Image (cartoon, grey):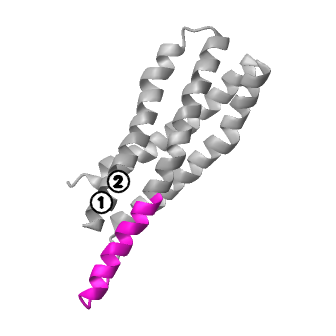
Amino acid sequence: MLFILFKLLHLLAIIIWVGGMFFAHFFLRPAVQGLQPPERVTLMHGVLQRFFAWVLVLVVVVLATGIGMIGSIHAMAAQAGGQFNMPVNWIVMSILGLVMMAVFGHIRFALFKRLDAAVQLKDWPAGGKALESIRKWVSLNLALGLVIVVVLRVPL
C-alpha cells in the first residue's frame, strides 16, 4: 500500500514538473514575446518565481518517493528471502532524475538569481539574457524529463 502511495505522489510530482516546463516553453514564452521588455521580463520573473517554488517541493517529493519505492521493493524482497537487483531502466531513470535535479538547482540558484537582480535593477537587457539562459537549461531539463517518461516508462 505504501508503495502505491509513493508511486502516485512520484508520478503526480513529475507530471506537474514536466508539464509546467512544457507549458512555459511552448505556450507562455511564445505568448509573451510581443510584450515590451519591462512587461515581459517582469511577467516571466513572477511566473518563474512561483513555478520554481513549487518545483523545489516537487524535487523533494520525487526524490523521497523514488527512494521510498526502491526501499519498499528491497524490503519486500528481503522479507521473502530474496535479493533485489534494481532494473537497468530504474538505474537510468534515477541517474537522469538526479541530473534533472542538478540542472534545476543551477537554474533556480544561479540563473534565476541573475533574473531577480535584473528585475530589481530594472535592467531589462540583463533580464532578457537571464531568461534566455533559463530557457536553454529548461529545454535540456524538459528533454530529459520527456526521455524518462517516454523511453523509460512506456512499455514497448
Q: Is residue 15 above or below residue 98?
A: above
Looking at the image, which residue sits at the far right? 121
Side (left or right) of 126 relative to 41: right
Based on the picture, tell me whether residue 41 belongs to the magenta stretch.
no
- Distance in Å between CA atoms under marks 2 and 1: 6 Å
**Magenta residues (range):** 63-84
Q: Main secondary structure of the magenta part?
A: helix
Q: Are the residues flagged by discs 2 and 1 in contact, CB closer than 8 Å?
A: yes
| Residue 91 in the figure: left or right of residue 137 | left
Q: Which mark is residue 9?
A: 2
- Residue 7 % position (x, y): 31, 58
Query: How many numbered dots are placed on residues in this image?
Result: 2
Image quarter in which the C terminus is found:
bottom left
Amino acid found under the numbered disc labelled 2: Leu
The amino acid sitting under disc 1 is Leu
In the displayed structure, would residue 42 be above or below residue 105?
above
Image quadrant holding the N terminus, namely bottom left
- Between 3 and 105, the one nearer to me in the picture: 3
User: Which SS class for mark 1?
Assistant: helix
* Residue 22 in the figure: left or right of residue 38: left
The residue nearer to you, when weighing 70 against 133, is 70
Q: Is residue 14 visible?
A: yes
Q: Residue at x 58, y 53 (%)?
A: 102
Question: Residue 63 placed where, x, y %?
Answer: 47, 59
Q: Which of the two residues, 29 or 20, is positioned nearer the viewer here?
A: 20
Q: Which mark is residue 5?
A: 1
User: Given the current orientation, which residue lies at the most extreme left position?
Assistant: 156
Residue at 51% of width from left, 58% of height from top? 98
